[in-house]
Image (cartoon, rainbow, N blue to C red):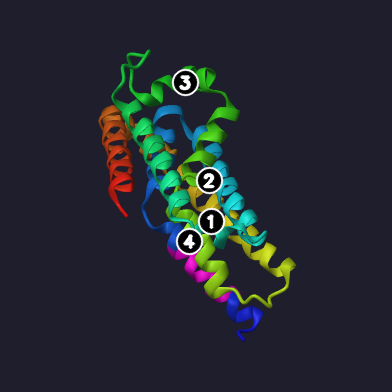
């Protein structure tokens, strides 16, 4: 049986590798920053962390493995997640109320959205990702020993969730730097459409993958 220290190193390493790999959460946070500014990116990062916490919670309660064993439930989550990503991505191609680039309409966009909705979008982006669900289930069933104390497992879960928040908050900070904002003034709308197309592509890939 691995010691807690060995488990912690394994959980930390696997988590950091997973969180830094590009995927729907990455594209979502970048687009939030482009559309609504850094505040939306930070709220999205917290929402993603809450989505991870949700996966961890039902896994620790014993429902995660049960869900993973029912293919129809994974299929439902997969199609819902795909539809949500496509919906997010298509927003980049809809007419904007403002005439400037996304950076210039940050305040108007934030007023239209609200903090609660920005946070909830992050939760949905992660919670409806079946790969995130299976990642957490696999981590706690294959890496973490069943004899590990529940308090330690909860600590692992908090670390995983906070690692996601920290990484995507750092991504938001990088996108929000003054130099990056100056660059966005010239091609922000084009980049927004590129990221939107990536979200649509990720949604289509999620819907068509087994």
- From the viewer's perspective, is the residue at label 2 or at label 3 nearer? 2
Dot 2 and dot 3 residues touching (CB under 8 Å): no
Regarding mark 3 in the picture, which secondary structure is present there?
helix
Question: Mark 1 and mark 3: span between their CA atoms?
Answer: 37 Å
**Residue drawn 68% across and 75% down?**
148
Q: Residue furthest bottom?
A: 1
Question: Mark 1 and mark 4: span between their CA atoms?
Answer: 13 Å
Earlier in the chain: of badge 2 and badge 3, it is 2
Query: What residue sits right under mark 4 in the picture?
Result: 135
Q: Label 1: how many residues lie within 10 Å, few (<14), some (14-19) or many (20+)?
A: some
Question: Mark 4 and mark 3: span between their CA atoms?
Answer: 34 Å
Q: Position of residue 150 (x, y in %)?
A: 72, 68
Query: What residue sits right under mark 3 in the picture?
Result: 109
Q: Which mark is residue 67?
A: 1
Earlier in the chain: of badge 1 and badge 2, it is 2
Q: Quadrant of residue 57?
A: bottom right
- Part of the protein shown in magenta: 8-17
**Residue drawn 59% across and 77% down?**
7
Q: Is residue 107 above or below residue 160?
A: above
Q: Quadrant of the N terminus?
A: bottom right
Earlier in the chain: of badge 1 and badge 4, it is 1
Q: Is residue 153 above or below residue 110?
A: below
Q: Label 4: how many residues lie within 10 Å, few (<14), some (14-19) or many (20+)?
A: some
Q: What's the magenta bit mostly, secondary-structure-wise? A: helix
Question: Mark 1 and mark 2: span between their CA atoms?
Answer: 20 Å
- From the viewer's perspective, is the residue at label 1 or at label 4 nearer? 1
Q: Quadrant of residue 210?
A: bottom left
Dot 4 and dot 3 residues touching (CB under 8 Å): no
Q: Which mark is residue 48?
A: 2
Q: Label 3: how many residues lie within 10 Å, few (<14), some (14-19) or many (20+)?
A: some
Count of number-bearing discs = 4
């Amino acid at each position: 049986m691995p010691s807690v220290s060995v488990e912690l190193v394994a959980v930390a390493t696997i988590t950091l590798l997973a969180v830094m790999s590009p995927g729907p959460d990455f594209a979502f946070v970048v687009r939030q920053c482009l559309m609504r500014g850094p505040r939306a990116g930070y709220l999205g990062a917290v929402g993603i962390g809450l989505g991870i916490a949700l996966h961890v919670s039902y896994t620790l309660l014993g429902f995660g493995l049960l869900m993973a064993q029912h293919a129809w439930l994974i299929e439902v989550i997969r199609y819902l997640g795909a539809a949500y990503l496509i919906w997010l991505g298509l927003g980049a191609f809809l007419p904007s109320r403002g005439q400037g680039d996304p950076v210039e309409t940050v305040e108007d966009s934030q007023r239209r959205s609200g903090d609660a909705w920005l946070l909830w979008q992050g939760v949905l982006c992660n919670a409806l990702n079946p790969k995130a669900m299976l990642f957490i289930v696999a981590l706690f069933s294959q890496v973490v020993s069943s004899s590990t104390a529940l308090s330690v497992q909860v600590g692992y879960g908090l670390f995983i969730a906070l690692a996601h928040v920290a990484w995507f908050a750092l991504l938001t900070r990088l996108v929000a730097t003054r130099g990056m904002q100056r660059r966005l003034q010239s091609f922000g709308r084009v980049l927004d459409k590129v990221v939107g197309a990536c979200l649509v592509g990720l949604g289509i890939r999620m819907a068509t993958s087994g």
